[in-house]
Amino acid sequence: MKYLDEYRDGDIAAKIVAEMRRIQTRPWVLMEVCGGQTHSIVKNGIDQLLPEGVELVHGPGCPVCVTPLEMIDKAHAIARLPDVIFCSFGDMLRVPGSDGDLFTIKSSGGDVRIVYSPLDCIKIARANPAKQIVFFAIGFETTAPANAMLAWRAFEEKITNVSLLVSHVLVPPALEAILASPENRVQGFLGPGHVCAVMGYGEYLPISARYKAPIVVTGFEPLDILEGTLMTVKQLEEGRAVVENQYSRILNQTGNLPAQQLIAKVFEVSDRKWRGIGNIPRSGYRLRAEFAAHDAEKLFDVAEIATLEPEICISGEILRGIRKPHDCPAFGTLCNPQHPLGATMVSAEGACAAYYAYGRHLKPRSADALHRIDAVPVAAATGDRA
Amino acid sequence: MCLAIPGKVVETYDQGGLRMARVQFGGITREACLEYLPETQSGEYVLVHVGFAISRVDEAEAERTYQALKELDQLNELDAPDVDESEADPTVSRFIKGRDGN
């Protein structure tokens, strides 16, 4: 497919890695922010291709993962109500709450539907005037324009049986929380390409300057990720820390202004709790007061549900780049995609689920050995290495 | 979750007051809302996320980035001094010599 296939070329990938090896003089720790990037990295083995000492740690950018358990339980309580049609993106259906997941609710008679676009809820609402249509509006800034449009259309068209259960999160406050932590290891970021397609990258300039951390806004294909990594390593080697744009075919500093305008009309910034991390001030969106008639948290009296996360789970440290999935004693045994214990295993884009899906159950013995073979092609080709 | 896919706009139209398009992704065609890219014309490529076009693909930038990546090692080759076999990476030469000696 155009604009996808050309960014998957193995020969060019090898050239980028060779260039990285040429310029790198010491170890660096980079974080890819998005779950989609994590998935692409592990699926394509990009982390194993990088020169020794260029380490990628996996960021908090998976909205399904960081949606707090209390919110999942609230969604489930609403979805169980008669007269409710509960609509969600497909990724949320498998996420377990304290008691089952949306699939279980559907199989026991709840009307749970997967939608492709939030606007599908309008069609469902018109076809089912006697039902309440509740949409689980989760996501980062990338998804906010779509979810905002649903609230706006319901409001403008006075469609009274549509509401949103909003659990929106924002990337910049999460990056600041990671950088401000005394345990932080991250020296540079591969920034979130599709979040910035909507918001631009102006918000990242002060963060990069304040924490002296390069942020390279990066795409999702293998060559995008390798080039973003090269650009970040180059900045670190040269002692620079600025925001750069690897994904220039998709975005610029300004982002999508009509989308930003509708987001601002519908949502306001609020504190949000992130699963595995905890409360981050001003790190999410909630509906503005004018949209109260479409706010599922106000319409449905769902009491606060006390939830407990398993103590063994280290997803909070994984989301902040402090540890990796195979550092966890439960990884792949007590905790797996069928029975996830925490945030990073609940969605395919979570770091633990990606490691599980692509067989990364063990710590790499020595990435070093692989790269030496790579660096001496004659020796490797003969297979006759001392 | 932030998955967004580039596709070609094959038709634009209005539906209930919303600007919409049919967008082709390889062999699949789906509907996408164009409200956030109202100027989009048929034949252009847009990035679609959960049924909304959020960004136009800049074809000139795509071509420029791709060419720059393809030419990456050629630039280095221009930089690098000429190397004959005796001056090659010492690890490689030692190994080659060792093999020859066996």
Image (cartoon, rainbow, N blue to C red):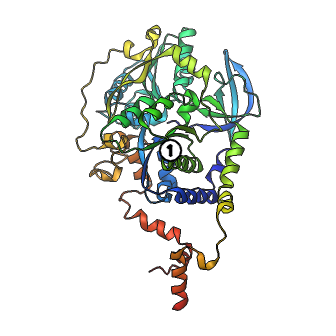
Is there any visible trace of residue A60 in the rendered image? yes
User: Residue A355: where, in percent of width, then height?
Assistant: 41, 52
Residue at x 63%, y 36% (from the top left corner): A250
Q: Is residue A350 visible?
A: no
* Among the 4 quarters of the image, the one containing residue A279: top left
Q: Is residue A154 left or right of residue A343?
A: right
Using the image as rendered, state which of residue B73 and residue B10 is in the foreground.
B73
- For mark 1, name the chain: A
Residue A298 placement, left or right of B44:
left
Q: Residue A206: percent from the left, percent from the top?
A: 47, 29
Give the residue drawn at x 52%, y 68%.
A375
Location of the C terminus of chain A by quadrant is bottom left
Disc 1: which residue: A37
**Residue that lies at the very extreme toward the bottom in this rendered image:** B102
For the point 47% across and 79% down, which residue is it?
A385
Q: Position of residue B26 (x, y in %)?
A: 68, 43
Q: Amino acid at mark 1?
A: Gln
Is residue B16 positioned above or below A69 on the image?
above
Q: Dot 1: few (<14), some (14–19), or many (≥20) neighbours within 10 Å?
A: many
Identify the residue shown where x is 57% and y is 9%. Answer: A156
